[in-house]
Image (cartoon, coloured by chain):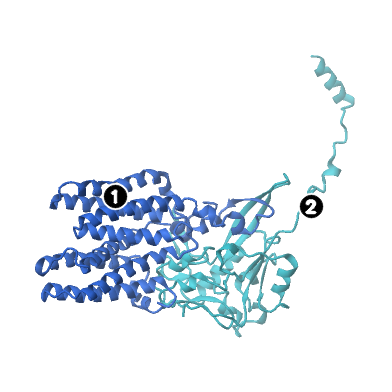
């Protein structure tokens, strides 16, 4: 799949924002007043920038409100609703914490749950697609949730939780890559099933429908990045997981925390880029590109 | 609404005969022509005369080479591909706005372009590559089964079928109702063993493809008539042959 910047920004930043919100709503760190204001501002900022970025890849962003209508069948629509509800509930919780120094714990738990539900809905936009076997697996949701939680733990300065969650995310990512690399092969979709001509013999693409590219080949038959996939996986592991854990094991300070956060977010971007670039859409079979 | 109907009164769709298709792309052009001039946003081209032309099409013809395992000659199959109007259309249910829908009366899958936000998720959900975002209008385009022709009483009756079917010079495309076992398309599918594309995706496509008929083992019927008439040269050529051998 084409790794569009807007979608990478959307999934990464909204995940971080909702992850941080979840931690803040659970009372980590236990702050109020102006300190709480700064923490919540960062969380709402990240979530909002992510959600706004998602509209940049729309052909008609002016009609975006229509996307709230089909929550009964569409994960994209559900994601929209959950994001709005989560922001409203956590917004109320934040207002009380910042301005009234009142912490209503059950409201915080509800807010945290809604934040995680939003991240889950985001992951299901991708995981529901049978056409992309690599995504069509529970590890997709597990990774989105673990990345949101580890980012949230890191941003909220909850060091012990951050170390555990980052290690869990790294292990899950290794497992997801391991499973993902054989998902297309195991999906049963191949050139024989795509053309229905496998009973005659071996099917190969002789000529595409046209000499140039098209929307389908640009959007779904993205193959450029595969060349460096292994190197990028290593970079993502080192930046996103290895470096932050090493830094967190050092005596804690603001500089170290900032470095750990920067490395983790860098790794997250590389991971998300790979998430799209490595995803093989079965339509590529019709173009002989799988 | 993006909830799929549990039942459609008719199942309109196409049968494409891979034995007959000659790969002329006339259906592609007829489709682009009709759907640019009629219902919905025109099918645009960008940089049409430049280095990197792209455009939206609702029907594209691939060509595949098939090498039989028994060393028989390879076959070249032309393979037109458009929306299969699936019964369990994944493109419809993923749509967040309700722009995509499947009609209860005839099973045609359509896009209400004024509701489409151009998010592209339906194109991702389609295994067949039947949906393309128009590069200019930025809305999702797909085969309408020429819904503005098949019921159009302003057209002569023989024109009330999809443009691709009407134009096909080889008669490789057939239009009809798959819910009726007596229809032309149902009969063709039963007779020729019509195939579903990617059944493992669970989309239950309505359109069917007729596989190429088995080829004759000896494809060169002129071969017996072209046997060499003189294996050993005679006369002047015979003398020349012998003379050259001796040198």
Mark 2 surroundings: few (<14), some (14-19) or many (≥20) residues within 10 A: few
Q: Position of residue A180 (x, y in %)?
A: 45, 53
Residue marked by disc 2: B216
Eyeballing the image, is A127 above or below A114? Answer: above
Chain seen in cyan: B
The quarter holding residue B215 reads bottom right
Comparing A35 with A278, the one in front is A35
Q: Is residue A40 visible?
A: yes
Residue closer to the observer: B188 or B140: B188
Residue B192, numbered circle: none
Residue plotted at (54% across, 54% down): A186
Residue at the extreme bottom of the image, as rendered: B153
Could you tell me if the residues under marks 1 and 2 are in contact, i.e. CB atoms within 8 Å?
no
The blue-tinted chain is A
Determine the secondary structure under disc 2: loop
> What distance separates the C-alpha of mark 1 from that of mark 2?
62 Å
Image quadrant holding the C terminus of chain B, namely top right
Q: Would you identify the image quadrant in which residue B209 lies? A: bottom right
Q: Is residue B4 left or right of residue B244?
A: left
Q: Position of residue A209 (x, y in %)?
A: 56, 57
x 20%, y 47%: residue: A249
Q: Residue at x 29, y 68 (%)?
A: A51
Residue A175: percent from the left, percent from the top?
41, 51
The relative height of residue B186 versus residue B198 in the rendered view (above or below) is below
Q: Which mark is residue A241?
A: 1
């Amino acid at each position: 799949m084409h790794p569009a910047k807007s979608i990478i920004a959307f999934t990464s930043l909204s995940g971080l924002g909702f992850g941080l919100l979840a931690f803040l709503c659970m009372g980590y760190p236990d702050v109020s007043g102006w300190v709480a204001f700064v923490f919540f501002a960062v969380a709402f900022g990240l979530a909002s920038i992510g959600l706004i970025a998602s509209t940049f890849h729309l052909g008609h962003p002016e009609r975006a409100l229509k996307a709230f209508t089909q929550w009964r069948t569409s994960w994209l629509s559900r994601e929209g609703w959950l994001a709005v509800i989560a922001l409203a509930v956590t917004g109320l919780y934040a207002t009380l914490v910042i301005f009234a120094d009142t912490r209503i714990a059950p409201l915080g738990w509800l807010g945290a749950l809604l934040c995680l539900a939003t991240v889950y809905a985001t992951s299901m936009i991708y995981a529901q697609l049978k056409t992309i076997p690599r995504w069509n697996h529970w590890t997709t949701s597990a990774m989105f949730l673990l990345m949101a939680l580890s980012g949230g733990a890191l941003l909220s300065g909850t060091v012990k939780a951050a170390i555990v969650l980052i290690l869990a995310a790294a292990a899950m990512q290794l497992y997801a890559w391991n499973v993902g690399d054989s998902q297309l092969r195991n999906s049963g979709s191949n050139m024989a099933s795509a053309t229905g001509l496998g009973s005659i013999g071996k099917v190969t693409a002789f000529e595409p429908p046209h000499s140039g590219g098209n929307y389908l080949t640009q959007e779904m038959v993205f193959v450029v990045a595969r060349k460096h996939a292994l190197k990028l996986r290593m970079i993502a592991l080192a930046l996103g997981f290895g470096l932050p854990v090493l830094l967190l094991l050092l005596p804690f300070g603001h500089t170290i925390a900032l470095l750990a956060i920067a490395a983790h977010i860098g790794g997250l971007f590389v991971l998300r880029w790979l998430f799209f670039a490595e995803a093989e859409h079965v339509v590529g079979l019709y173009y002989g590109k799988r | 609404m993006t909830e799929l109907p549990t039942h459609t009164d008719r199942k309109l769709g196409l049968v494409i005969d891979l034995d007959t298709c000659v790969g002329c792309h006339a259906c592609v052009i007829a489709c682009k022509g009709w759907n640019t001039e009629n219902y919905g946003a025109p099918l645009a081209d960008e940089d049409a005369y430049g280095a990197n032309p792209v455009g939206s099409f609702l029907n594209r013809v691939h060509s595949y080479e098939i090498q039989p395992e028994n060393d028989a000659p390879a076959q070249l199959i032309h393979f037109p591909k458009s929306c299969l109007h699936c019964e369990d259309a994944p493109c419809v249910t993923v749509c967040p706005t309700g722009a995509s829908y499947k009609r209860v009366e005839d099973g045609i899958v359509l896009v209400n372009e004024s509701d489409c936000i151009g998010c592209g998720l339906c194109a991702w959900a389609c295994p067949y590559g039947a949906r393309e975002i128009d590069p200019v209008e930025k809305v999702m385009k797909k085969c309408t089964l020429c819904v503005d022709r098949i019921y159009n009483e302003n057209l002569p009756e023989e024109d009330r079928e999809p443009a691709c079917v009407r134009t096909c010079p080889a008669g490789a495309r057939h239009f009809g109702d798959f819910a009726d076992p007596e229809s032309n398309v149902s009969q063709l599918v039963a007779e020729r063993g019509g195939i579903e594309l990617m059944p493992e995706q669970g989309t239950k496509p309505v359109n069917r493809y007729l596989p190429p008929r088995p080829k004759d083992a000896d494809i060169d019927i002129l071969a017996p008539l072209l046997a060499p008439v003189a294996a050993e040269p005679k006369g002047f050529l015979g003398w020349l042959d012998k003379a050259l051998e001796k040198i």
